[in-house]
Amino acid sequence: MEALIKKLVEAYGPSGDEAPVRSLIEEEIRGAVDRTWTDNLGNLVALREGPEPLLMLSAHMDEIGVVVTHIDEEGFLRLAPVGGVSPHLLVGQRLRFKEGFTGTVYHEKLKSLKELDWSKLYLDIGAVDGASAREKVGIGDAACLDQPFAVCGGRYLGKAMDDRIGCAVLVETARRLSRELPQAVAFVFSVQEEVGLRGATTAAYQLKPGYGLAVDVTRVGDTPKAPLSAVGLGRGPAVKVKDSSVITHPLVRKFMMETAEEKEIPFQLEVLERGGTDAGAIHLSREGVPTGALSIPCRYIHTPSEMVDAGDVRHAVELLTALCLKPWPRQKVLD
Ligand code: CO
Ligand code: ZN
C-alpha cells in the first residue's frame, strides 16, 4: 500500500484542478469495481453493484494550494490561498504547477513575522522578467506544495495526506472486496472539499445513498502543548462523534463501533471542535442521509509534512472492509 500512498500524495491536485489525481485513482480502482464514471463537477464514482441500501464512501481528491493573482515586471508572482493555507507555513517552501515546474516562496522585508500576510508573500519561479514569467504561468494558475513522500519510523510523511490517505484507504478497501456484497457500495473520490464540501454535495444528490461515510484525516492532541484532544497517532482510526459540519447519526456510530469490536480492530472516538468533512454535505442531501466518518489521525494538517501512522491506516482499511461486508440495517431507527 506504501507505493499507492506515495503515488497519491505526490500527485498534483489543488481544489478545482483534481484531474491528475482522478486519472491515477481511476487506473488503480477500475479492476476492483463494476463501473466508474466522472460526474459534472469532476467527482470520480467507482461503483460495486449490490442490493439497497447504497453505502456511499467519500474521500476527497483535492488538496490545499495557491492560485496566482498577479505577475510583476520583475517576474515575481503574487498568490492567494486555495483552502485553509497559512502564509507562514509557505515561507521557504517549494510550490509546483501542474506542468511540473517549481518555484520557491519568500516574503518582502518585514519588521516582524507578525506582519506576514498574503500581500507580503511572493513566489519566485526563476523568471528573469515579467514577460518570461508570463510565458510559463498565467493569472488563475494553481500550484500545490512540492514535498516527497517519506516513511519515518512507523509513520508516513507527505503533503496532501489530507485526504489522499483517505483515497488510498478507499482504493485498498475496494481491492479487498472480492466476494459478493450485502449492499451496493459507491466509492466516491470527491472534488473541492477544502473550499466547502462542494463535490460531495452533488455526488450525494446524484447517488441518493441510504448511508454515508466520509473517510478523511482528523486533528490529534498528542504533540507538545497541542490543544486538548483525545485522539492520538497509533491508537487506531477514529469513529467521529461530531465536528462543526456533522453530528454522526447514532445508528451509524453504533454500527461502526460494534463492527470494530467484533473484528477486534482498535479505534478511538473523535470529537472535533473545529473543521468538517464530506460527511457534512452528505448527511444534508435530499431528505437527509444517516452519515458518519472514519477518520485517520493526522499531525500537522495543512502543512507541507502531514504525518499519519501506518498501523492506523492498516486498521482503517480493515474496519472499512468489514463495514462493506456487513449488511447495514434497512430500517432506520433512532435509539
Ligand atoms: Co483539509
Ligand atoms: Zn480533508
Image (cartoon, helix red, strand yellow):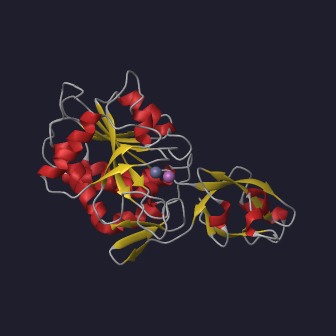
Residue 250 relative to residue 83: left or right: left
Q: Position of residue 233 (x, y in %)?
A: 35, 65
Residue 93: x and y in percent read 63, 70
The one nearer the camera, 101 or 211, is 211
Above or below residue 206? Residue 102 is below
- Name the foreground residue: 201 vs 333: 333
Of 237 and 31, nearer the camera is 237
What is the x, y in percent for residue 88? 66, 65
Residue positioned 84% across, 68% down in the render: 129
Residue 304 location (% of width, % of height): 54, 66
Kindly indicate the quadrant of the structure image that contains residue 131.
Answer: bottom right
229 vs 169, left or right, is right
Residue at horizontal 42 percent and vertical 60 percent from the top: 220
Quarter of the figure that contains the N terminus: bottom left
Which residue is the extreme one toward the bottom?
Answer: 153
Tell me what residue is drawn at x 43 percent, y 52 percent.
23
Relative to 24, residue 224 above or below: below
At 62% across and 65% down in the image, what residue appears? 89
Is residue 38 visible to us here? no
Q: Is residue 181 visible?
A: yes
Image quadrant occupied by the C terminus: top left
Q: Residue furthest top?
A: 287
